Image (cartoon, rainbow, N blue to C red):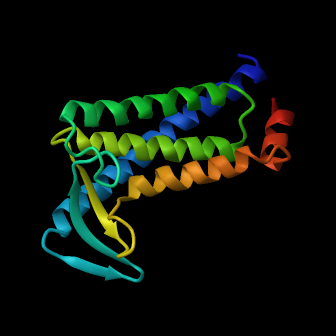
Amino acid sequence: MTEHEAGPTRRRASLIVLAALLSVLLVAAKIAADQLLPGRIIEVGLIQLRLLYNPGVAFGLGADLPTWTRLAVPAAITVGIGVYGWRRSAAAAGRIELGCLTVMLAGALANVIDRLPDGVVTDYLHTGWWPTFNLPDTFIVVGALVFAFTARRSDSPDRAEAERRD
């Protein structure tokens, strides 16, 4: 294997392995919330830990849709993120871009895994001014925001470093 081939292979492996490991941690957080939070509210600074089951796709929207739809749409989006990440891993994607895709994929995958058994997602982070959400949602949103911000910067040092590397 040439050095040029090893770079994309290593980046792809990193994307998949890290997203899988992070997904396991996120699902473990969901299991902990299921076991520790029923009937309780725990104050943690600006955030409360409280258990809520969200049958909707986002913010409770789509709760009346058939279960297969609420599973298929997020699963398709997750596959889309994975395919895009796979392709960008072979291209001159920088570390920040790949990191964003990894955390977005991990969050999306964890939410799909959470929804599989009963059609709902376990939410456990509450601010009082925003709908209750979970850690995978945070991974998706923060990853997408950083991705969008850095994608707009054509003079990004991360992008220049990736172009020099390949």
Is residue 91 visible to the viewer in this orientation of the structure?
yes
In this view, the residue farthest toward the top is 1
Residue at x 36%, y 47% (from the top left corner) = 24
Quadrant location of residue 2? top right
**Image-based side of 48 in relation to 141, left or right:** left
Q: Position of residue 46 (x, y in %)?
A: 42, 80
Residue at x 56%, y 48% (from the top left corner) = 144
Check the image and report above or below for 14 versus 134. above
Check the image and report above or below for 158 versus 47. above
**Image-based side of 10 in relation to 63, left or right:** right
Quadrant of image for the C terminus: top right
**Image-based side of 120 in relation to 7, left or right:** left
Q: Nearer the viewer, residue 88 or 144?
A: 144
Q: Nearer the viewer, residue 160 or 151?
A: 151
Is residue 21 visible to the viewer in this orientation of the structure?
no
Residue at x 41%, y 42% (from the top left corner) = 108
Q: Nearer the viewer, residue 164 or 47?
A: 47
Residue at x 28%, y 59% (from the top left corner) = 123
Q: Position of residue 148 (x, y in %)?
A: 65, 47
